[in-house]
Amino acid sequence: EHRMLRFDPRSGNLAITDLGRTASHFYIQNSSIDTFNRMISPTLTDADAIHVLCHASEFENVRVRPEEL
């Protein structure tokens, strides 16, 4: 579903994909990977890429300091 693992039903083997390895290495949450899979397209502009990154669940607890407003 999130394309982080590949399952071979014939042999029963699970194999990690490059996406899964990257998510594991950088502690990217499953919900963020789902968001990236839904929002990323081949025609992504720089502004669109930043928009996608801002939707990552890792940023939901980041608060703006009063002096930054």
Image (tube, rainbow, N blue to C red):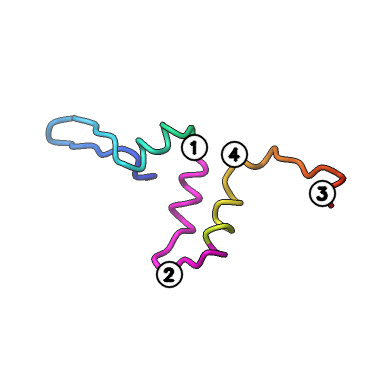
Residue extent of the magenta highlight:
30-48
Tell which residue pokes out farthest to the front in this image.
67
Q: What amino acid type is highlighted by mark number 4?
A: Glu
Circle number at residue 68: 3
Q: Earlier in the sequence, mark 1 or mark 4?
A: 1
Give the CA distance from mark 3 to mark 2: 32 Å
Q: Are marks 1 and 4 in contact (CB under 8 Å)?
A: yes
Residue 6 drawn at (x, y percent):
26, 39
Q: Are marks 1 and 3 in contact (CB under 8 Å)?
A: no
Give the CA distance from mark 1 to mark 2: 23 Å
At 55% from the left edge and 56% from the top edge, which residue is drawn? 52
Which residue corresponds to mark 1? 28
Element carrying mark 4: helix
**Main secondary structure found in the magenta portion:** helix
| 62 lies left or right of 68 | left
Which residue is at the front of the view, 10 or 13? 13
| 56 lies left or right of 23 | right
Residue 29 magenta-highlighted: no
* Mark 2 crowdedness (10 Å alpha carbons): few <14, some 14-19, many ≥20: few
At 46% from the left edge and 56% from the top edge, which residue is drawn? 38
Q: Earlier in the sequence, mark 2 or mark 4?
A: 2
Which residue corresponds to mark 4? 58
Which residue corresponds to mark 2? 43
At 46% from the left edge and 44% from the top edge, which residue is drawn? 33
Element carrying mark 3: helix
